[in-house]
Every structure is written in C-alpha cells, then in structure tokens.
Image: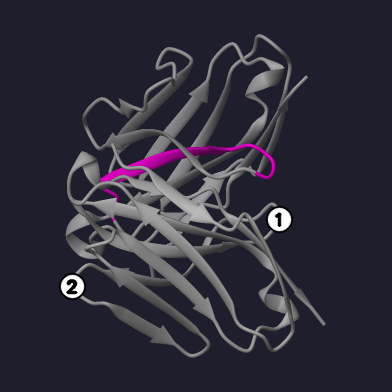
C-alpha cells in the first residue's frame, strides 16, 4: 500500500514556457502533499505543503507565483513551473501522506527531471 | 522552523565494517525521525524510522537510536555490503507546521569490497 505516482518522469521545455507535474496517491487519500526540489548532489529542499481544498503553504524563498500548486482532490496535486528558466532545471519530487492513517510517514513519487533549455 | 544537520557528508568503509551517520535537530516538537536511502536519480526509500516515544529500533543490519534530550539521532549499519553504497538522508517531522518533513544534507556512503 501507500503508492504515490508522479508524472512525467522526464520533461524538457523551452525557456519561458510552463510545465505541469502531477502527483497522485494511488491507494490512499492524501490529505497532505509536499513538493521538494533536489539539485544534483544536494538534499531535498521542501518547497511547499499543500492541503486538499486549501491554498498551499510555501517555504521561505519559494516564489508562489512561479511554482503554482493545486491540490484539488484527495488523490491529486499538481506543480506548475511557470515561465521556466534554465536555473529551474532540477529533480522535482512529491510526497504524500494521510495523517490520520499514516501519521507523519510520507511516501514519495518517482520524481520528475525538468530540463529547461 | 526545524533545522536538521547531518554528519558526515561522505563516509567510506570496508565491506563488513559498521557505518554510523549522525543527525541533530532543532525543534523539540519534532516526534518522528525517518531515514531514507537514495540511489542516483531515484526516489528516496524509507529504510527505518523511529518515533519519539522509543530510544532505539532495529531491523536486521540497520538500527536507529534517538536521544530526545540532546536532540540527536543516529543510523547504524552493521556488516556493510557494497549494495549499501548510496546517499542516506535523515529527516525530522512533527505535528506542528503541517507535519512537514525536513531533511538533513545527506551522507554519501561508499562500501569498498
């Protein structure tokens, strides 16, 4: 149980365009989802926390207008990188939790490699 | 907010030896401490976790210890094998702040055959 799927695995986009990444919980209802960014050889940096039906809470230094997060249902959260630039190229990974069922334990999606050219 | 520090950043051991990775956290409200193993380009895999109501937990060759007073927790891997080579992350999470999980900087473990 506790399977989280993320799509796409790889995406290449041109500078100035937007790209959407989806995160789905397949066998549980994710009341909370988290989006992380990981640069090569670095740690996972939390970008934002999203709760179903409410606005995401962004970490300090993360531009909410650039990284749009929508958590419209209990099984789906999306991250849209708007007006992407080469410095946005990174590994983006989501995680999901059902706090009542799993407590603090989070389950990761496969991750998405974004390359902006 | 929570801050997690992890040491060492790299660790090289001989096959069969033990490896120890240490972490400290800053938020006394944190009550859940997972450890993840990440191979290149893949998602982190939960290998063991500990909650604040216990001091030690063991699963075969892997053990975790927690000292809540000192805000320290450690990962111990015994009888290391080449396939243990990976990056290991500690993390901390609590009931406040939306249960968000904050990660340490990671330790790159090399197990030499």
On the image, numbered disc 1 is attached to which residue?
B40
The location of residue A48, given as percent across then percent down, is 37, 32
The location of residue B47, given as percent across then percent down, is 48, 72
Residue A67 falls left or right of residue B94: right
In the rendered image, the vertical position of residue B36 relative to residue A13, given as above or below: below
Q: A59 or A89: which is nearer to us?
A: A59
The location of residue A76, given as percent across then percent down, is 38, 41
On the image, numbered disc 2 is attached to which residue?
B53
Q: How many marks overall?
A: 2
The residue sitting at 54% across, 15% down in the picture is: A82
* Colour treatment of the image: one colour
The residue sitting at 71% across, 77% down in the picture is: B83
Badge 2 element:
loop
- Which chain's residue wears label 2? B
Q: Give the range drawn in magenta.
A: A29-41
Residue positioned most to the right: B113
Q: Of the residues under marks 1 and 2, which one precedes in the sequence? A: 1
């Amino acid at each position: 149980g506790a399977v989280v799927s993320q799509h796409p695995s790889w995406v290449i986009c041109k500078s100035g365009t937007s790209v959407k990444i989806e995160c789905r919980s397949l066998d549980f209802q994710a009341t909370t989802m988290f989006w992380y960014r990981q640069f090569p050889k670095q740690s996972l940096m939390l970008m934002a926390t999203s709760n179903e039906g409410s606005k995401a809470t962004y970490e300090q230094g993360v531009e909410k207008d650039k990284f749009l997060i929508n958590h419209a249902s209990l099984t789906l959260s999306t991250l849209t990188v708007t007006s992407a630039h080469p410095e946005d190229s990174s590994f983006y990974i989501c995680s999901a939790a059902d706090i009542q069922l799993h407590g603090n334990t989070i389950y990761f999606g496969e991750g998405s490699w974004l390359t902006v050219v | 907010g929570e801050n997690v520090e992890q040491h060492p950043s790299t660790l090289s051991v001989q096959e069969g030896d033990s490896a120890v990775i240490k972490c400290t956290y800053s938020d006394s409200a944190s009550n859940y401490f997972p450890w993840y193993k990440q191979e290149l380009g893949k998602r982190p895999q939960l290998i063991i976790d500990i909650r604040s109501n216990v001091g030690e937990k063991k699963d075969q060759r892997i053990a975790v210890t927690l000292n809540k007073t000192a805000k320290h927790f450690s990962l111990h891997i015994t009888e290391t094998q080449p396939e243990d080579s990976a990056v290991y992350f500690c993390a901390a999470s609590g009931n406040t702040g939306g249960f968000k999980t904050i990660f340490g900087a990671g330790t790159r473990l090399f197990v030499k055959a």
